[in-house]
Image: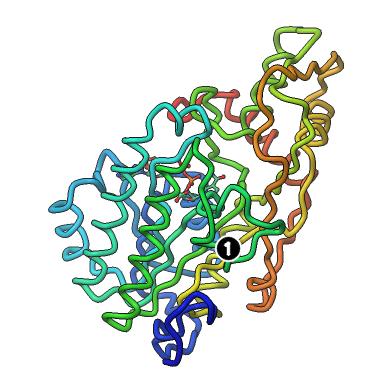
């Protein structure tokens, strides 16, 4: 209860005096976005941990943009725990083409869920944001304290502002209502149930799809954007789900927590590994007339390490199993199993 300003570090007045304890396996746990990349991994993790009453609704069953419907759902199910992994998510093309939708839909989804959770007395809640909340030129690796210190990457600033509003909403609920709610900011994620649609996907699923299709078509070359030199961090979504449960049971605090591996690789290295795993023997061309994006994006994960968690799934193993999953699902786009 001592400081207010960023110069003093995280806002201590958001401390609510909650001491983390193991979650009750019999309590109702609502995973918003339970069919998505993160949500589905979290459901698998919770099931493995013995949770007996995991609740999920598809966007068709419950549109989280519909405030009345969300409140009705919370009153009916009365979840004790919530993980908010539902969001309008996309890669650089989708984000820069539809900034209004990325801003407006995400603000509505999270405001509805957080307000309904407040009204119905949800005890523990985890809000998921993204590393794009940090300034474009944040020093690497990016610490949690970099939030609010500079301009955002313009291609996804609308999405990032929505996520920053979500973090603030969680902090405000702590400050005003003493809720022991927390936020986590994952790095780039990958794994089963990812979005492999070329129009909306992130870099890693896009590469998996491109190389797989090249093998299928017998193509001799694959062309990727840029030089391949940017460095990126990738976390397997099963690790992410494990970190979510760990944070819910072991961490409390107002400041968002970065979730990543703490190490990065070049896009070229990723492309080469994927090419090798899918059996592509042709040539990779780097179209250097196309932009590279930011040269490096790596999260500082010391806060998470201090909370007792670290990533376990190696990149090559994770890629192998994700590619197997993709091929096992007919290389299909999401929604077309
Ligand atoms: N993927 C990454 O690399 C990454 C990295 C950092 C942070 N994150 C964060 O992690 C969270 C989850 O991302 P994800 O990759 O798991 O996304 P995802 O695979 O696209 O899943 C998002 C889920 O949100 C649900 N959803 C979207 N709009 C909805 C609506 N109006 N009503 C109800 N449900 C709705 C969808 O449900 P239906 O399937 O039923 O339509 C979908 O399953 C997001 O907050 C994202 O910012 C992801």
The percent coordinates of residue 309 (x first, y second) are 67, 71
Q: Quadrant of residue 277?
A: top right
Q: Give the answer, above or below, for where 101 lies relative to 285.
A: below
The count of marks equals 1
Residue at label 1?
146
Q: Quadrant of residue 146?
A: bottom right
Q: Nearer the viewer, residue 51 or 16?
A: 16
**Horizontal side of residue 127 vs 249, given as left or right:** left
Q: In which quarter of the image is ligand 1?
A: top left
Q: Which of 314 and 98 is in front in this view?
A: 98
Point 75% across, 35% down: residue: 267
Quarter of the image with the N terminus is: bottom left
The percent coordinates of residue 205 (x first, y second) are 62, 32
Mark 1: secondary structure: helix
Q: Nearer the viewer, residue 112 or 82?
A: 112
**Horizontal side of residue 303 vs 287, given as left or right:** left
The percent coordinates of residue 204 (x first, y second) are 66, 35
């Amino acid at each position: 209860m001592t400081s207010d300003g960023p110069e003093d570090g995280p806002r201590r007045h958001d401390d609510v005096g909650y001491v983390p304890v193991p979650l009750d396996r019999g309590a109702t746990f609502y995973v918003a976005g339970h069919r998505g990349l993160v949500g589905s991994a979290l459901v698998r993790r919770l099931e493995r941990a013995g949770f007996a009453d995991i609740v999920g609704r598809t966007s068709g069953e419950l549109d989280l943009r519909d405030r009345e419907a969300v409140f009705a759902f919370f009153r009916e199910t009365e979840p004790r725990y919530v993980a908010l992994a539902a969001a309008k998510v996309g890669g650089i093309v989708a984000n820069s083409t539809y900034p209004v939708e990325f801003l407006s839909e995400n603000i509505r989804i999270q405001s509805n869920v957080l307000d309904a959770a407040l009204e119905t007395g949800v005890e523990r809640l985890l809000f998921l944001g993204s590393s794009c909340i940090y300034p474009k030129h944040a020093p690497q690796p990016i610490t949690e304290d970099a939030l609010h210190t500079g301009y955002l990457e313009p291609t996804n600033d609308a999405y990032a502002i929505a996520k920053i509003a979500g973090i603030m909403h969680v902090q405000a609920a702590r400050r005003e209502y003493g809720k022991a709610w927390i936020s986590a900011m994952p790095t780039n994620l990958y794994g089963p149930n990812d979005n492999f649609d070329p129009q909306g996907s992130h870099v890693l699923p896009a590469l998996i799809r491109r190389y797989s299709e090249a093998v299928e078509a017998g193509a001799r070359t694959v062309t990727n954007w840029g030089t391949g030199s940017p460095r990126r961090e990738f976390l397997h979504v099963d690790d992410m789900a494990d970190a979510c449960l760990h944070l819910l049971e072991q961490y409390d605090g107002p400041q968002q927590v970065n979730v990543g591996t703490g190490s990065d690789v070049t896009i070229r290295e990723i492309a080469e590994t994927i090419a090798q795993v899918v059996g592509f023997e042709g040539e990779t061309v780097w179209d250097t007339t196309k932009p590279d994006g930011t040269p490096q994006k790596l999260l500082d994960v010391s806060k998470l390490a201090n909370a007792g968690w670290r990533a376990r799934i190696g990149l090559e193993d994770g890629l192998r199993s994700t590619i197997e999953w993709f091929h096992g699902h007919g290389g299909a786009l999401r929604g077309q199993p």
